[in-house]
Amino acid sequence: MTDADDPRAWIHGDESAKAMLARVLTERSFLLLPPLHRLPLRVGNVVEIAGPSPSAKSQVLLQAAVHCILPREWRGLRFGGLERMVIYFDLDCRFDVLRLSQILKHRIKEVLGSTNNFGHGVQEGSQEYDDELLLACMRRFLYIRCYDSYEFIAALKTMHSHAQTESEALGVGIQFLMIDSIGAFYWIDRASQPSPYGNCTRKIMSFQNLVESIVEEMRKFLEVQPLLVLASKSCIFFAGSSTTDVQRTPTTWSSEDRNQWRTSNKQIEKFLYREYMPSAWQAFVTHRIHLQVSDKCTYDRKYGTMPIYMSKWVQPPLNVNDQFAVGDGGIFLIT
């Protein structure tokens, strides 16, 4: 019986202050920015961000990444970030580094602009100051692109040593493991049936086998490096459903069709989308949030007309639906 399993170990109180702080700080939950702000998340959680395309799933990941790589304080100015590293797996090869830089620069300018108004002596528009902080933040963003499931598995196998080297070089720990998107190779893996060469009897890796291998490697990685996992996933349609009505803009419908669409929105959503990831991934996920674009728009004097997105926690279920929009500085709630 180990000390962790022995109840008497709790009575002895032989844990050092350093060990206690390391355990408490590691297990401490935290709140992210909208729309992930409803539930306290901690390292070890696996959050699936599901929704059709487009529903701002990648924008949610980028905003969480910016919050993570921003410093808590910088030269006396409070930015409120986590000042930790992010590992970002780009599986659908649509990562926009300019968008990441845009959100990051906007957050930095917000803090610099507010401090200038209070006379903190930081010159507004100081390019040298901005570039130095921007470079320090971008160094905490570890980007990895994979073109198939086998590359993804290989990258996960070597991730611990790679991440440890980067973490030691920067002197900060790793907080987030992001995957965009986990189902990117679904159709390729389903269609691919490798044929054996000659008398080779190698195991044929089905889509389920590949996902099981991915989950196994991620579990191994999380055992040695506790992280919060954020993974986006695109929804697919039932084989018997029609995507035409979903892709049509509701504003082009007649008033009768529009009213019918609004009243039966929940039934349509349940009918159209189905779970296609194997049970190994479903059991691995601890939290799930669903995003979708609504038929409404909002107007902002700076950004003009913007679509409104909706978010709903389905695991664990919450009776709260949030509405948000996406601007140059990231996501903001609509109340």
Image (cartoon, rainbow, N blue to C red):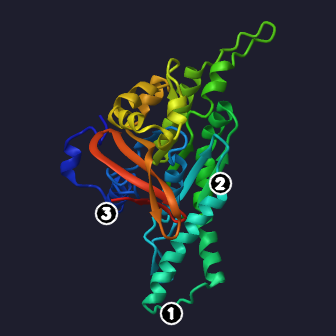
Residue 77, image x, y percentages:
46, 81
- Name the N-terminal-most of marks 1 and 3: 3
In this rendering, the label closer to the viewer, 3 or 2:
2
| Residue shown at the point (61%, 84%) measured from the top left | 125
Amino acid type at circle 3 is: Ala
Is 184 situated left or right of 249 in this image?
A: right
Answer whether residue 306 is visible to the viewer in this image: yes
On the rendered image, what quadrant is the C terminus found in? bottom left
> From mark 1 to mark 3, how far is it between C-alphas?
39 Å
Q: Disc number at residue 121?
A: 1
On the rendered image, what quadrant is the N terminus found in? top left
| Label 2 element class | loop
| Label 1 element class | loop
73 w.r.t. 219: above or below: below
Answer whether residue 235 is visible to the viewer in this image: no
Out of 226 and 116, give the one closest to the viewer. Answer: 116
| Residue shown at the point (43%, 70%) measured from the top left | 80
> From mark 2 to mark 1, how far is it between C-alphas?
34 Å
| Label 3 element class | helix
| Residue positioned most to the right | 198
> From mark 3 to mark 2, how far is it between C-alphas?
43 Å
Q: For mark 3, what is the residue?
A: 17
Amino acid type at circle 2 is: Asp
250 w.r.t. 270: above or below: below
- Name the N-terminal-most of marks 3 and 2: 3
Q: For mark 2, what is the residue?
A: 96
In this rendering, the label closer to the viewer, 2 or 1:
2
